[in-house]
Image (cartoon, grey):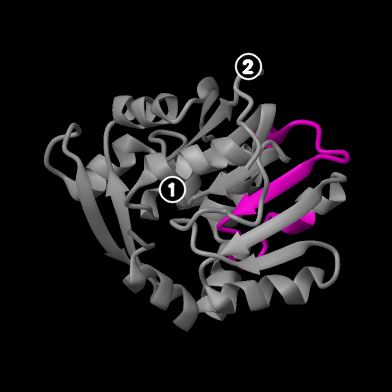
Amino acid sequence: MRTDDTVTTSYDQHAAAFAQEAAHSPYNAHYDRPAVLDLLGELTDRVVLDAGCGPGLYVTDLLARGAHVIAVDASANMIDLARRHVAGQITLRQHDLTDPLYWLSNNTVDIVLLALVIHYIDDRIALLRELHRVLRPGGYLIVSTSHPTADWLTAEGSYFDTGWVQQRWSCGITHRFWHQPLQAWCAEFTAAGFTIDAITEHQPAAEMARTHPAEFETLTRQPGFIAYRLAKPTSGTDGDA
């Protein structure tokens, strides 16, 4: 099953507005990106796949830290925006993550970054297994997503409910995301062959206290996002494609 067409269409229609919002918003600039970048570790000469790269907001940091970057996104307009920032420096490709990464061989990527993407995917285990395939043994997949408790507060009902929740952001994007409890996320990661190396419940960067004090106060009391560093075991080599 493909990425939800409503989400992809919204990102295409509002790509420029989203790029501007995500570049400076408290939840992106001062919350998700700092936490995720801390999980990446040493990147010099590492091959990093930015899966669902959007307008390329992570790419500049990845390149600055010495990575060789491959970036993909389902939205053609997002890829165009990313290309403007880093033309010629990385491999950019329009690609729906619900399709196999047929153009990447087994065991060829050191780190995969899946930042605020997985909650859009219907068959998450299939995607996770495909990312496991392209990772080298000992490589990492970094996944960030909304915190299950934040989803519960948004959707109401029971924390243990699973299902789709829909929101509309101020930049015009219709945001349809999957909600499930923490144990369900962990079960999907391990079912795909990963071990859970680290879990980070985001803390807001100090700068947010100055630029967005209300959001800072909220996020110091209740989590909004969560990130997982998932390892491909060294014995987990996939056979040649």
Image quadrant occupied by the C terminus:
top right
**Spatial CA span between label 1 and label 2:** 25 Å
Frontmost residue, 109 versus 100: 100
Report the residue at 81% width, 32% height from top. 42
Q: Residues within 10 Å of mark 1 (few under 14, many from 20)?
A: many
- In the displayed structure, 12 sits above or below 154; it is below
Image quadrant occupied by the N terminus:
bottom left
Q: Is residue 160 at all visible to an observer of this figure? A: yes
- Amino acid identity at mark 1: Ile
Number of the front mark, 1 or 2: 2
Q: Report which residue position mark 2 lands on.
A: 235
- In the displayed structure, 2 sits above or below 124; it is below
Q: Report which residue position mark 1 lands on.
A: 118
Q: Is residue 151 left or right of residue 95?
A: left
- Amino acid identity at mark 2: Ser
**Relative image position of residue 23 (x, y in whole percent):** 63, 64
**Magenta-colored span:** 37-60
**Relative image position of residue 180 (x, y in whole percent):** 27, 38
Secondary structure type for disc 1: helix
**Relative image position of residue 59 (x, y in whole percent):** 73, 57
Q: Is residue 146 at all visible to an observer of this figure? A: no
Q: Is residue 221 left or right of residue 136?
A: left
Q: Residues within 10 Å of mark 2 (few under 14, many from 20)?
A: few
